[in-house]
Amino acid sequence: MIRTVSLFFVLLAVWLLLSGHYTPLVTGLGVFSCLLSALIAHRMDVVDHEGQPLHLGPRIIPYWGWLMAEIFKANLDVAKCILSPKSHLRPSMFTVTASQKSDLGKVIYANSITLTPGTVTVDLDGDRVLVHALTVGSAEGVKAGDMDRRVTKVMEEHL
Amino acid sequence: MIDLALDIATWILLLAGGLMLLITGLGLLRLPDLYTRIHAGGMADTLATAFIFFGMALQSGFTLVTAKLLMIVIFIFFTSPTASYALAQASFVAGLKPKLDGFEDEDA
């Protein structure tokens, strides 16, 4: 039930941000359609822990901040590699182990690897993640497992 | 005065984003195979998008337009890794072998 309420408020926030019209009639129709959508989603039983990951709570915010900093550094690394491939380009492929138990945790980890330029998740099978890396530095970054630990910490309550 | 400073900052951010896109294009042509080119494409989705977003957000200020721009950036950050993964996974399953030189892991 709490997830349906949360879905309603997310829909309402998106509607208010996108519409820009705040006359009583239009806003009332917007609120009504958000309510109707939330109720239909509730009846269809599609409001689950993946669509509304409330259990992650505010811990995901500092993780996003850290991820942004990592993306910035990785971008400079890839740019260097493109500009002088001879000295930096060392493609490699290897498997690492994901320590998250839930599907959502594994998806967050695998997507974080892919979002960071220089490393791409090629395959995710059970807890084995097959990663393709562009340079020595980006490969070492994934192998060090810092990102894996941080994602596990974000998921902590659900382990 | 503030306007001029904002304009200069916007210029710098947009040019930095454009430079990133240029390097991305260069990488797409220059790198040897599909897997390495995916990495180059990843740059356009992340830092270039972020630079251009901040540049445009400085012009629009605290308005609904900035909120909409932010939503676009969030959508890109959620969907682009999914697309990259789908591309890499499809090529891998189809049997395309990545070109590797040097330090390969034992169980790769």
Image (cartoon, coloured by chain):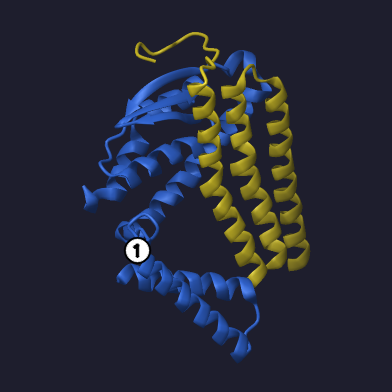
Chain colours: A blue, B yellow
Looking at the rendered image, the quarter that the N terminus of chain B falls into is bottom right
Whole-percent x, y for residue B75 in the image? 56, 53
Task: Identify the residue at horizontal 45%, vertical 40% (top origin).
Answer: A111
Whole-percent x, y for residue B52 in the image? 68, 51
Looking at the rendered image, the quarter that the C terminus of chain B falls into is top left
Residue placed farthest to the bottom in the image? Answer: A24
Residue that label 1 marks: A45
Whole-percent x, y for residue A43 in the image? 36, 69
Whole-percent x, y for residue B54 in the image? 65, 55
Residue placed farthest to the front in the image? Answer: A44
Whether residue B62 appears in this view of the structure is: no
SS at mark 1?
loop
Left or right of residue A135, residue A127 in this image: left
Q: Amino acid at mark 1?
A: Asp
The chain ID associated with circle 1 is A
Task: Identify the residue at horizontal 52%, vertical 9% (top origin).
Answer: B101
Q: Quadrant of residue A19?
A: bottom right
Left or right of residue B12, residue B72 in this image: left
Task: Identify the residue at horizontal 41%, vertical 67% (top origin).
Answer: A41
Q: Quadrant of residue A7?
A: bottom left
Q: Is residue B84 above or below residue A61?
A: above
Q: Is residue A2 above or below residue A106?
A: below
Left or right of residue A25, residue A97 in this image: left
The residue nearer to you, when weighing A130 against A149, is A130
